[in-house]
Image: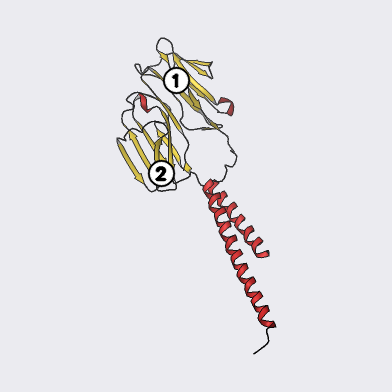
Amino acid sequence: MEVTALCFSLLMAVMILQCEHAQRVDSASLHITPDKLQFFSYEQVTFRCESEFNDGVIKKLEGKLQSCSSTHKTPTRSICSIKNLYLEDSGDYVCVAGRWDVSNIISIDVTDGSVILESPAHPVMEGEAVTLSCRNKMMSFNFTTDFYKDGVHISSSSAGNVAIGRVSKSDEGLYKCNIPGVGESAESWLAVREQHPHTRPCHIYVVLRTVFTIVMVALLLLLVGLLQSEKLRATIRNSFLPNK
């Protein structure tokens, strides 16, 4: 029993170490270039999937992923470039690596309208500076722009952008812009990441692998214990048998 308890304790320690390692190592991650969520029709976009696995695949959650105009693959990275975006390319994209490793979701919005909001596709770290820009498809020079957060007007700019010097969690929300007489953009979510995020849970495949190991070792120890017990009983029986 003492051996079994010791082995179980060691295996639990191994599981904790594996989980801590999994928390330090980034899981699959999806990146987008240019770094924004809204696009005009026929713009180009590049998705980059990075993972510690060799089989990272970029997927669209609903609908068909448009054929990549160019691709590139390495043992830890896969890239898909789409030359011309269409309205049906709007949606959620992920990177899937291995059986359990799924990346962050990037949701893009493709429009045939005249106005888009350019905001970071990935969470902004607290304390960093971020600039939201309003783009007019027809004009490239400065124009008066109104910016909204969660439906509430927050700023007007003659330069077509609004800057947030030090981002905090209170800045997280849905943003959009409006150019009077031209049009309004769709809303995009600006995510803000804490400086010291909570430790993320251990990957499920680490837990399953460790539980499987514990079960197998326990069964092995049980089998060894039964064999040893049988040998001990046989030795005791033989010791009481009369010598021939």
Give the farthest residue toward the left: 69
Dividing the picture into quadrants, the one containing residue 224 is: bottom right
State which tag comes first along the sequence, 1 or 2. Answer: 2
Q: Nearer the viewer, mark 1 or mark 2?
A: 2
117 vs 12, left or right, is left
Q: Nearer the viewer, residue 116 or 106?
A: 106
Position of residue 176 measured from the top left corner of the image (x, y, whole percent): 47, 19
Give the farthest residue toward the right: 240
Q: Nearer the viewer, residue 145 or 158?
A: 145
The residue carrying pointer 1 sits among few (fewer than 14), some (14 to 19) or many (20 or more) residues within 10 Å by Cα, namely some
Give the farthest residue toward the top: 181
Residues at marks 1 and 2, CA–CA distance in whole angstroms: 30 Å
Position of residue 185 measured from the top left corner of the image (x, y, whole percent): 43, 18
- Residue under circle 2? 56
- Residue under circle 1? 186
Position of residue 119 measured from the top left corner of the image (x, y, whole percent): 46, 26
